Amino acid sequence: MNFVLIFLITIFSLSLFFYGRSKTKSISIEKNIKLNALPKFYGYYLVLWCSIPSLVFLLIWTLFEPAIIKSIIIETAANQGAIFNDKNEANLIYEKIKAIYAGTYFGDIDTILKESALSYAKFINLFTNSKIVLIFGIVIASVIYSLKKIKNNNKARDDVEVILKGLLFASSLIAILTTLGIIFSLLFESIKFFSVINIFDYLFGTNWSPQRAFVSDASAITAAEYDELKDAFGFIPLIAGTSFIAFIAMLVAVPIGLFSGIYMAEYASVKVRRISKPIIEILAGIPTVVYGFFAALTVGPFFRQIGENLGLTVSSESALAAGLIMGIMIIPYVSSLSDDVINSVPQSLRDGSYAVGATKSETIKKVVIPAALPGIIGSVLLAVSRAIGETMIVVMAAGLAANLTINPLESTTTITTQIVMILVGDQEFDSPKTQSAFALGLTLFIATLVLNYIAQRAVKKYREKYD
Amino acid sequence: MTKEERLKKRHSAEKRFRFYGLASIFVALLFVLILVHNIFSKGSSAFKKTAINVEVFFDQELLEIKNGATEDQILEADFYDITIESLLKVFPAQDLDQENQLIDLFTTDAEIEIKRAFLENNNLIGKKINLEITASDDIDQLHKGNYPRDLPEDRRRISDFQLIIYDNLVENKKIIKNFNNYFFKNGDSRDPELAGIGGALVGSFYSIIICLLLAFPVAVLASIYLEEFAPKNKITDFIEININNLAAVPSIVYGLLALQILLATIQLPRSTPLVAGITLALMTLPRIIIPCRASLKAVPPSIREGALAVGASKFQSVFHHVVPLALPGTLSGTIIGLAQALGETAPLILIGMVAFVVDIPSTPIDPSSSLPVQVYLWSESAERGFVEKTSATIMMLLSFLIVMNFLAVYLRQKFEKRWN
């Protein structure tokens, strides 16, 4: 249906273009007046007026129609005596009703289902019909308005440009809408979570085991139940595990990345640089799921084998394996950025250092790096934020159980791993367990935001210093 | 310490420092090599599958259909009996247990393969033909040398009797390797020998196309606005900061956004390329806007001023002159953004693309998987056969990424103008 509507609108708009162009031409000849714009702009003007309002309306309608119909149908089903205890059962009944409507349901159909399916069909028809009527109304109204405008010989080019400029502005607003969407979707569920679990119990609790958290009725939790719950949602082991793995990653990425950045900026010939820089950047282009696979199936077992030979017990999901591979993934972030930063240190600083007799490495260590330090720190912070937000490597190679440990050979878990573990598969609606994933997401979002902000400030300050 | 000694020390420190730099580049390059080698050595065998040459006799009594039967009749006919009959003729089995072990050497789809051969040529009643029936995963892995046969029998998935049959078949040249069309054609399966990336390929394709259709126009329009039209004010600054921040938000957060807004609020269908495409578009948008703006910025102001000077409006100067000149950079930035989106896994897991989907999606609103998610799913499976399948999927994924990146570089080098 939507495709037919879009097709009709497109066809109509296109024919309006030719109509508007020839109409204004003939008006100008008949009445012997000078048009305020080239005839084609009158065509464009009609096209924009005909298509934009109706398409925007269609988009909004399509986005919200299913949710509205669903809530109406579930309500009517409930009025007819259908019994469901929670959202899951309601969803199931709704899916059944939809299947009956589509003729793909082969189970028993009782009267409630049958009635609901009939009313579903009724509402679908009602909604479709009113959609068509409304869209035709909008198209006709906007076409009448715009036709009137062009008959009065409006400044069509200016008007078209104003509309297009609005369109451009609207596109750039999508970035803001996305941010708002992220913040609201995270906040919405997090607030529900923090209304059950005290935020301080979450932030300072030392035990994380959400699979133990069963709540029969979230609105009435007894004190004993709360103690149990509070013990299931302690954030400390997750932030510890996340920082620990990120720390191991930085131990790998910072020296290798920094040294390669320095070498490429200061020593490498143009040819070496042109070959090695893209190859190192391949590391950043490989999907993280590939690193995860490599860490889980090759590096983890390899470390365990070495550990066995040395008489150590190494978990096959050790923090070491995950951290090492994550570090390798991050090398190009550190190397490319520090390469850029070092390159923008003014040559005069180096020349001064050479003039007093310093060798190249002394110049780098004592002059270039101190001068570039804010930028380098910025690039390292960006890499850290990349590391704590990284998901697939830790999901596949780090553990699932939240251990508070600083032994790199044991398994630890991270914030991102827990989000995935909680939300994968069947979810219970409105349980603190599901909501806790959003609280974790919010924590992660804030942490990366703060790190990025500081890093960008550092890099910007540094750039301004030498501009 | 004399002057010479000090100088020598300083010079060796210089050499050491230089060596560290070279060594770190070398380590990074070495790692690229190890990774690629590891994946390729594990994965390349998955493009071939092991099959066993079996003589099939289409017995009219067992099949209960005649030559020239219609397609419906063939599809309805029961090929189970002749399948078992033919498979058992491969090697003499003594008892029921041995017969079962013998049948276990073949894929569970052996009957379907025989039926398919009959469908292609339905004049086979009463005739004997040689068919290449796909072997089971265990035999496949054994034949490819991925399975240790010197383990004690109780720790092997293949029994001694099966090994005897296998050796006999190898001796008689009945075991062959042929092109693994299942890997490209089939959807997911619990049996490694039947599992393929067909569904994941189609799912990824739909997702990326939707991502492109949504992200590219919006990103281009937004960058044109910000670079060419936006007044310098607080709103513009705010949008800019926003875009930079969005580009650095961890991808899993976009998964949470999609879960809450697209699935819970708007009620789009779960596990579908449609939702995946929208999620990836939101994620890719800021990553495309940044290079788009850079390429618009690289067009020198003289182009705009020239257009304005001969009486073009601001819009005409931008759309007739600046945008076409910035197009190569814009396109290559878009392709690189799409390549990143193609490899993205975490948000897709959250929107339910980890569901076990056997059917190949025919529209973007059918449940589906995608290439990186398939890698994740198979890497969690215990069967040995999935290791090579996973690696081969990674090879496919990496080759797509390489092609896209080369395309981006080519576009930029071929069409981009240098202005100085």
Image (cartoon, coloured by chain):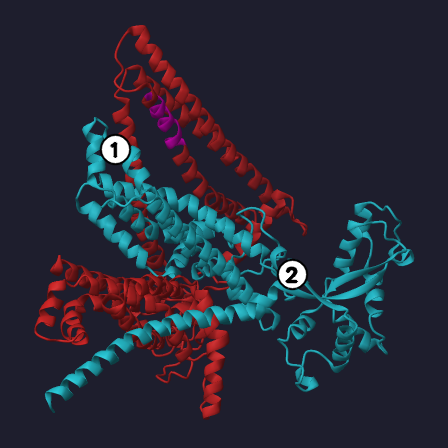
Q: Which residue is mark 1?
A: B317
The spot of residue A376 in percent (x, y) is: 22, 68
Q: Is residue B348 above or below residue A224?
A: above
Q: Measuring 41% from the left and 44% from the top, which residue is drawn there?
A: B214
Q: Is residue A81 above or below residue B136?
A: above
Task: Chain letter for mark 1, please.
Answer: B
Q: Amino acid at mark 1?
A: Ser
Colour chain A is painted in? red
Q: Measuring 50% from the left and 75% from the top, which residue is drawn there?
A: A297
Q: Does the segment drawn in magenta span residue A47? A: yes
Given residues A261 and A137, the one toward you in this image is: A261
Q: Secondary structure at mark 1?
A: helix
**Earlier along the polypeptide chain: callout 1 or callout 2?**
2
- Which class describes the residues within 10 Å of circle 2: few (<14), some (14-19), or many (20+)? some
Q: Quadrant of residue A134?
A: top left
Q: Quadrant of the C terminus of chain A?
A: bottom left
Q: Are marks 1 and 2 on the same chain?
A: yes
The spot of residue A350 in percent (x, y) is: 13, 68
Give the magenta range: A42-54
Q: Is residue B375 above or below residue A244?
A: above
Colour chain B is painted in? cyan
Given residues B380 and A110, the one toward you in this image is: B380
Given residues B397 and A174, the one toward you in this image is: B397
Task: Chain letter for mark 2, please.
Answer: B
